[in-house]
Structures are given as structure tokens and as C-alpha cells.
């Protein structure tokens, strides 16, 4: 059983989620696009970037999710160097918490079959700082922290554990990335713009979470490794422990730097510095009406309009720039 938590940076935004610092941090020197708000200094107050809410609602609508009438931000506490204030402003779907949207689905074409993967929730949260390892996750004697990324707007989308193979997980992420690309909310070609946490269990065993995987290809590799690791433990009479593991891309293994936190360990409670956000139905409908042509719709049109096979159309719409190039060339001809 595999479930995914996919974090997409809203790279269409110029500023961070709760402050006016530039969100275009990749070309800047470390720790230069920061301010008291995104560093969590005492006395600083967050202010919501309204465009971020719009972009996340577009994603939710594209995934057939149901937007909430009102959404609330929560503090998610944990002690780790990538979050200066020791909590992340996120959202929570229990204990009275309401995320931007819930429910929804995404269909995967698997040969001649279509598999529907259910969406649990779509939420808006701030990104954390980037931890830089001088060599590799296993061999570095120290780490460095760049807070330029802290506070960048993220859309977190969580699936139900409906995926049953590493290959399916890769296909799901590739299709989701194509939707983000067509919506124009996330440039998935940018380093770190799309990061995945994958939860996996075998034979009803304990759940293991693989953190911060940076590409669909690496998601498939990490899950394949983890499946074999867990099978070997079970075959030797061992027991799978609930834990958080990281994918070491250089050595192509998963490593366990810490045990898996339980939900209560995060000590969620409402963010008192941000009021509940009303989401008017008229606003939602205006966003729905303005949605661009999405990959599935575009593929159907390619089959109907250009006589392509479903496979050919699927390959073209998997990357927006490829589909755009195809139609531009036809226009020139």
C-alpha cells in the first residue's frame, strides 16, 4: 500500500506565503532573501499572500476536490534546523481544522485499464529551509542551512493509499506534474519545486515514510528499494518499524535518521496570528470557469482533432511545452 504527499512550490508567485521576501531564491546567495517573518523572529506577524490561495484552489478544482467554505491555518511543531521558529504554518484536517479542499481523484491509465486514485486533501503551507550536505547524506560531517526557501508557498496534496506499486506512484506524480504545468502554477523543471513524501507498507505492516524525494524517477527507485528492504526483514523473521527514512540519491539507498513522529508529536493548534479565511462560492466558480484546458481534455482533443492514438496524445500532453510545440508546428505548417 502506497500513499503520497506531494509538495509543489507555487513558483508563479513573486513573494513568499506570509511575507514580501522574494520567492525566486534559487539564484540568490544563501540566507539573503529573508526577513523577521520568515525567520520567525519574536514580534513578527505573518500576512497571507492572497494569490497563493487562488493558486491552490485552482489545483484543487483540477483534482475534482471540494473547496471549503472557510479554512484555518495551524502550527505544526517540530524541532529541526530547517524551521527557524520550530513550527511550520500549515493546515490540519482534524480536531476542528479545515484545509483548503478535501476529496477528489486522479485517473491513471494502466495499459487497457483506468485506475482511480482518491485524493484525501489539498492544503496550503509554508516551505522550510534547505539543508545542504557538503558531500552526501551518509558521509557529511556537518550540514549547512539556507533559509532563502523558508516561507515559500507550498501546495501539499495527499492521496489515499490507493497505489499498489512503485511504477504507479511514478505515473501518478508525472500526471500531477503535467496538471500543475498546464495550470501555470508550478514550474516543475526548477530544482526542488516538486518534492514527494511516500508512505509505504507491505502485508499490513507498519508504515514507513520516505521523505523529500525530488523526482518521479527517484520516487520509483526509492520505493523499489524500500519494498525489497522490507521484504528481506520480514523473510528473516524481523518486524518493520514505523519510521521516517530519507532517500540517499547518491548511494541509492534509504536511510533512517529519525523515528517516525506520531500526529500528537506535532502538537497542532490553530495559528492565532492568522484569522480563518472565508472562501466565497462565487469566487470558486469564477476560478473554475477560468481553468485552462487540462491534460486529459487536451489529449482527448488531440485524438479527435488530429487523429492521434490515445498513446501518442498522452505522450504529448505529459509535458505542456511538448504539446505546445506540437500545436505550434501544426500552426506553422
Image (spheres, grey):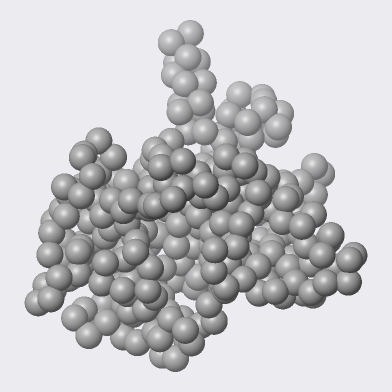
98 or 218: which is nearer to us? 218
146 or 170: which is nearer to us? 146
Tell me residue 298's x, y (percent).
Answer: 54, 38
Instruction: Look at the picture and state if 308 lies above or below 81.
Output: above
Q: Residue at x 26, y 60 (%)?
A: 151
Q: Residue at x 50, y 70 (%)?
A: 121
Instruction: Look at the picture and state if 209 lies above or below 146.
Output: below
Tell me residue 177's x, y (percent).
Answer: 51, 45
As drawn, which residue projects farthest toward the front? 141
Quarter of the rendering containing residue 129: bottom left
Classify residue 81 as left or right of residue 325. left
- The mark tally for this picture is 0
Classify residue 32 as left or right of residue 204. left
As drawn, which residue projects farthest toward the bottom? 95
As drawn, which residue projects farthest toward the left? 43
Q: Residue at x 19, y 81 (%)?
A: 273
Q: Residue at x 24, y 51 (%)?
A: 148
As drawn, which residue projects farthest toward the top? 333
- Confirm whether residue 253 shows in the render: yes
Quarter of the rendering containing residue 45: bottom left
Instruction: Look at the picture and state if 187 lies above or below 145.
Output: above
Classify residue 249 as left or right of residue 96. right
Quarter of the rendering containing residue 36: bottom left
Q: Quadrant of the N terminus?
A: bottom right
- Confirm whether residue 183 shows in the render: no
Tell me residue 13's x, y (percent).
Answer: 25, 49
Tell me residue 125's x, y (percent).
Answer: 35, 66
Instruction: Look at the picture and state if 328 lies above or below 165.
Output: above
Amino acid at each position: 500500500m502506497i500513499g503520497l504527499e506531494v509538495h509543489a512550490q507555487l513558483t508563479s508567485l513573486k513573494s513568499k506565503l506570509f511575507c514580501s521576501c522574494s520567492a525566486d531564491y534559487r539564484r540568490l546567495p544563501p540566507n539573503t532573501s529573508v526577513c523577521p517573518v520568515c525567520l520567525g523572529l519574536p514580534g513578527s506577524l505573518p500576512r497571507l499572500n492572497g494569490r497563493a490561495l487562488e493558486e491552490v484552489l485552482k489545483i484543487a478544482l483540477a483534482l475534482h476536490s471540494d473547496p471549503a467554505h472557510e479554512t484555518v491555518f495551524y502550527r505544526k511543531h517540530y524541532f529541526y534546523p530547517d524551521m527557524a521558529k520550530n513550527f511550520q504554518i500549515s493546515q490540519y484536517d482534524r480536531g476542528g481544522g479545515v484545509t483548503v479542499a478535501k476529496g477528489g481523484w486522479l485517473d491513471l491509465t494502466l495499459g487497457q485499464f483506468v485506475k482511480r486514485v482518491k485524493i484525501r486533501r489539498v492544503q496550503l503551507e509554508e516551505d522550510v529551509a534547505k539543508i545542504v550536505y557538503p558531500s552526501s547524506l551518509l558521509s557529511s560531517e556537518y550540514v549547512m542551512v539556507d533559509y532563502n526557501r523558508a516561507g515559500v508557498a507550498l501546495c501539499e496534496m495527499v492521496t489515499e493509499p490507493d497505489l499498489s506499486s512503485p511504477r504507479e506512484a511514478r505515473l501518478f506524480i508525472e500526471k500531477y506534474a503535467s496538471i500543475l504545468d498546464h495550470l501555470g502554477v508550478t514550474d516543475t523543471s526548477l530544482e526542488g519545486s516538486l518534492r514527494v513524501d511516500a508512505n509505504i507498507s507491505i502485508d499490513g505492516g507498519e508504515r514507513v515514510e520516505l521523505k523529500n524525494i525530488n523526482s518521479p524517477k527517484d520516487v520509483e527507485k526509492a520505493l523499489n528499494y524500500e519494498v525489497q528492504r522490507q521484504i528481506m526483514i520480514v523473510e528473516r523473521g524481523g518486524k518493520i518499524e514505523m519510521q521516517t527514512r530519507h532517500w540517499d540519491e547518491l548511494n541509492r539507498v534509504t536511510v533512517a535518521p529519525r523515528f517516525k513522529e506520531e500526529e500528537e508529536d506535532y502538537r497542532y493548534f490553530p495559528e492565532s496570528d492568522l484569522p480563518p479565511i472565508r472562501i466565497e462560492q462565487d469566487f470558486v466558480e469564477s476560478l473554475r470557469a477560468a481553468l485552462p484546458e487540462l491534460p486529459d481534455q487536451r489529449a482527448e482533443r488531440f485524438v479527435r482533432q488530429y487523429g492521434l492514438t490515445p498513446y501518442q496524445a498522452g505522450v504529448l500532453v505529459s509535458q505542456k511545452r511538448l504539446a505546445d510545440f506540437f500545436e505550434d508546428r501544426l500552426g506553422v505548417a
